[in-house]
Amino acid sequence: MDKVEVGDVFLIEDDQGDEQELEVLATAEMDGKQYAAVSFTEDIANETEEDIELFFLRVEEDGELSEIENDEEFEAVTSAFETQIG
């Protein structure tokens, strides 16, 4: 499994086909799966800490980031990151 680390930057394509940069702000492991808390690099550079919107994504075995589609899994991951980040 490729590890994702804090500070890693990924390019994603939004709904309009434009590329956006995401930066990993924190990582966590639960039930043998790795998760990343990410935000847009532009927001990190221009917003205050309180205004940055976080997204929680699953790290796949190949190191790619994917959405968490299961509500229970998403709530557990959100809770874990809230405890970790504060």
Image (cartoon, rainbow, N blue to C red):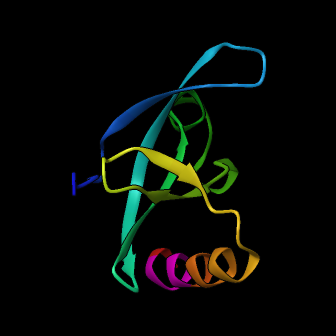
| Residue 66 higher or lower than 12, as above or below | below
Residue 85: x and y in percent read 47, 74
20 left or right of 27? right
Q: Which residue lies furthest to the front in this view?
A: 61
- Residue 36 % position (x, y): 44, 59
Query: Dividing the picture into quarters, in which one does residue 19 lie?
Result: top right
**Is 18 inside the magenta-drawn segment?**
no
Q: Magenta region: which residues?
A: 80-84
Q: Residue at x 62, y 38 (%)?
A: 47
- Horizontal side of 46 relative to 84 (left or right) equals right
In which quadrant will I find the N terminus?
bottom left
Q: Is residue 77 left or right of residue 29?
A: right
The extreme left residue here reads 2
Q: Is-magenta flag for residue 81?
A: yes
Q: In percent of the image, x 51 and y 86: which residue is there?
A: 83
Q: Which of 80 and 1 is in front in this view?
A: 1
